[in-house]
Image: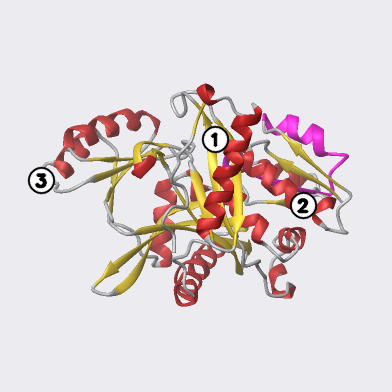
Amino acid sequence: MNVAVVGNGNREKAMKSVIEPSAGSSRVNSCVLVPWTTIDEVVAQVLDTADLVTIGPEAPLVAGLADKLHSLGIPTVGPTAAAAKLEGSKVFGRKICKEAIVRTPRYWRIDSERDAEALLANWEGPIVVKWDGLWGGKGVTIHHSAREALAKVSEGLPHGPVLIEEFLVGQEISVFFACDGVNGRFVGDACDKKKLLENDEGPNTGGMGAWSPSSYLTSHLLEEIQGDIVEPVLQVMKQRGVPYHGILYLGLMLVNVGGTILIYLIEFNCRWGDPEAQVILPRLKTNFVNILTATLETGGLESLPPIEFYSTKLVGVTIAGKDYPKKGSRLRTVVGSGKTYRAAHLDAYGQIEEMKDSGVLVVQDIQYRTDIGVGIV
């Protein structure tokens, strides 16, 4: 089997590393990265060479790449464009939550500045503003004044409706499921750091680091997530005629209310996270290709044995260009491993120091957080 991974970022490199023959899969002869450009260009590269395609970024999924490849008879891991609207439209995602009776923060759809002004006139506390569409993890902002929030709403309205949500205080975690249209199987969890700077300060980014497992996800909470979110959402999507196949990434908030942990769905994503994939995939003991291929057919996961994980703790530190996120990009993820989070943290930052000493990383050209994985029990 020849496998193509669409995308060439740090997430896709992590996917390739657990697919290629050196990872121990006897089913795979080769695995290549295919940069995302246009649907036609990707098709030209994989049409006669790939036996299986898996798509890394959200943009090609929302654009309909999986639909096109399926129509050409190429087995492709990832949701159709219609199903990928779970991530492609926050408004659509909230509609699905309402139909599936999934707990979310209180939210209001805003279609005009007048709507926003009326809503925020007597608002107390932080204000969450979410633009509709794909914004590379940077379409969500938190504001501490109505004036700031209104300015962000005005900036987003030309692109479509905007959501204003209540601000929740709790622990955010990322939980991932492989889905076959009717079933969802847990394939890992992580916590990531979105803010650019230490102590969660600075602007939002696509992710400046992560660790796995999250340390907050108990077996009881996982059962709740499976039964109260994943299964109802898959059922609603199937009823709508857009069954969900591929990886479903849930951004969740765990909120302590009088000693009871309530789970809130903050966002859907239709693919692996970046940098979460870099710290989840190496922990998979179950063959990754077997998981991917099981998502292709309706009910395919039912014949897959229980998914197993290594007990290793992983901490990933994002190395970004010095001007990120205003311009430039995230350059690489340095992943440390250990029996404890502390050991994994020390391993990751030890690697970074070695790269700086050897000239692989040039200090004046990069930036990274120094607190990823600190204080995790």
Q: Quarter holding the C terminus?
A: bottom left
Residue 345 visible in rendering: yes
Secondary structure under tag 3 reads loop
Residue depicted at x 65% and y 67%: 309
Secondary structure under tag 1 reads strand
| Displayed quadrant of residue 351 | top right
Q: Is residue 367 magenta?
A: no
Determine whether label 1 and label 3 are within 8 Å by CB: no
Vertical order, 17 against 202 (above or below): below
Name the residue beneath numbered marker 2: 19
**Callout 2 crowding tier (Cα within 10 Å): few <14, some 14–19, many ≥20:** many
Name the residue beneath numbered marker 3: 122
Residue 271 visible in rendering: no
Amino acid at dot 2: Ile
Amino acid at dot 1: Ile
**Which residues make up the magenta segment?**
37-58
Marks 1 and 3 sit apart, C-alpha to C-alpha, by: 41 Å
Name the residue beneath numbered marker 1: 319
| Displayed quadrant of residue 369 | top left
Amino acid at dot 3: Asn
Q: Residue 109 in the image: state x and y as whole percent.
A: 30, 46
Marks 1 and 2 sit apart, C-alpha to C-alpha, by: 24 Å
